[in-house]
Image (spheres, grey):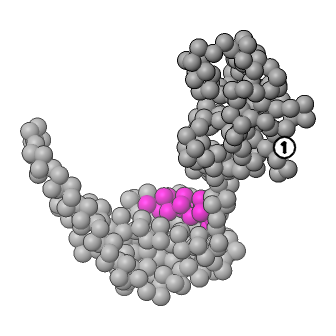
Amino acid sequence: MTSIKTKCNSKDILDRAKLVLKIEFEEIQAVSDKLDDGFVRAIELILSSHGRVIVTGMGKSGHIGKKISATLASTGTSSTFLHPAEAHHGDLGVVQKDDVILAISYSGETDEVCSLVPHFKRISTPIIAITGDPNSTLARLAYSHINASVKLEACSLNLAPTASTTVALALGDALAVVLLEMRGFKANDFALTHPAGSLGRRLFVKVGDLMRTDENLPSVGPEKFVAEAVLEMSAKRMGMTCVTNEDKEILGILTDGDLRRIISRGTDIHKKLVSEVMSKKALTIENNSLASEAALKMEKEKINHLLVVNSRGKLIGALGIHDLLEAKIL
């Protein structure tokens, strides 16, 4: 092994990195131009299947396969990964007749993968192959073949799987996204499979899940003095209070911003009524709206709080920007 360079030329480093990305970009473009009926047959097969997509591959292809399987599973296509070596020691039992095999091997001759084909054939499980050689054993035995051949790896030795694995991964993404669209998979469906992630929170969490209600909802009548409103805001730990009548109808809102303005003018908050200083234009949002919509509305209106109403326009709660931050909506 040659000695490691400790002094590097920044331009040389960036030029080499850009060349790697350029090679991989061009190889993806080239594979895109080679897409044919094999890809269409693969999509039609998966859509008509009543089972799962069982993805398999060895080495680097196996790592790519795991990611493809995960993407399929999170976008509406039931999928799992089968390690070829483990399959020979009992894991073949997970494969059922109604499943579809997605086998990845750049050479198309990987022993651990090709040796599984007779079993798949025996139980009539169809195979989709992603290989770099349309004439390989795996490609010839597959129901459908997707050509993933590349002219050049991004590795300067042209040995390490780089462009070829990137191409395989991109083809997996293409399969997943086309299937997603063909199935009519929507944002709400995606949220159901990602409830804990930031995407799921934005697509799934409702205002009603986060709003302050009942004894945690600051509220005063218009006849109260501003000093009393301050105590209510402090007790409920919210930077505002609703202003309502006896029927709990919204008359306005008093915020900490309003307080700062009136105090800066020398107003005696012990003598000033809430009705005289409140903002009569209280912005509201329905409890069934997405919390992400509330965040957008706050940003657009440059406010920190929204009053929450039900479908009949009745006040049922309040939502603050800190509630959104704690729930990681923002």
**In the rendering, at what x and y percent does residue 67 appear?**
48, 58
**In the rendering, at what x and y percent does residue 74 appear?**
59, 59
Q: Is residue 179 visible?
A: yes
What residue sits 48% from the left and 81% below the top?
39
- Above or below 267: residue 127: below
Report which residue position mark 1 lands on: 314
Q: Secondary structure at mark 1?
A: loop
User: Which residues, given as a range, are shown in magenta?
Assistant: 64-80
Q: Residues within 10 Å of mark 1 (few under 14, many from 20)?
A: some
Q: Quadrant of residue 43?
A: bottom right
Q: Nearer the viewer, residue 111 or 282?
A: 282
**In the rendering, at what x and y percent does residue 219 appear?**
79, 27
Secondary structure character of the magenta stretch overall:
helix
- Above or below 258: residue 115: below
What residue sits 32% from the left and 75% below the top?
29
- Above or below 153: residue 214: above
Q: Nearer the viewer, residue 70 or 295?
A: 295
**In the rendering, at what x and y percent does residue 32 appear?**
37, 78
Is 69 part of what is drawn in magenta?
Answer: yes
Q: Quadrant of residue 213?
A: top right
Q: Nearer the viewer, residue 287 or 173?
A: 287
Is 116 part of what is drawn in magenta?
Answer: no
- Above or below 75: residue 245: above
In which quadrant is the C terminus drawn? Answer: top right
What residue sits 68% from the left and 54% below the top?
192
**Going by the picture, which residue comes out furthest to the bottom?**
37
Horizontally, residue 99 falls left or right of residue 216, namely left
Q: Nearer the viewer, residue 325 or 93?
A: 325
Horizontally, residue 136 falls left or right of residue 265, namely left
What residue sits 47% from the left and 88% below the top?
37
Which amino acid is tagged 1? Lys
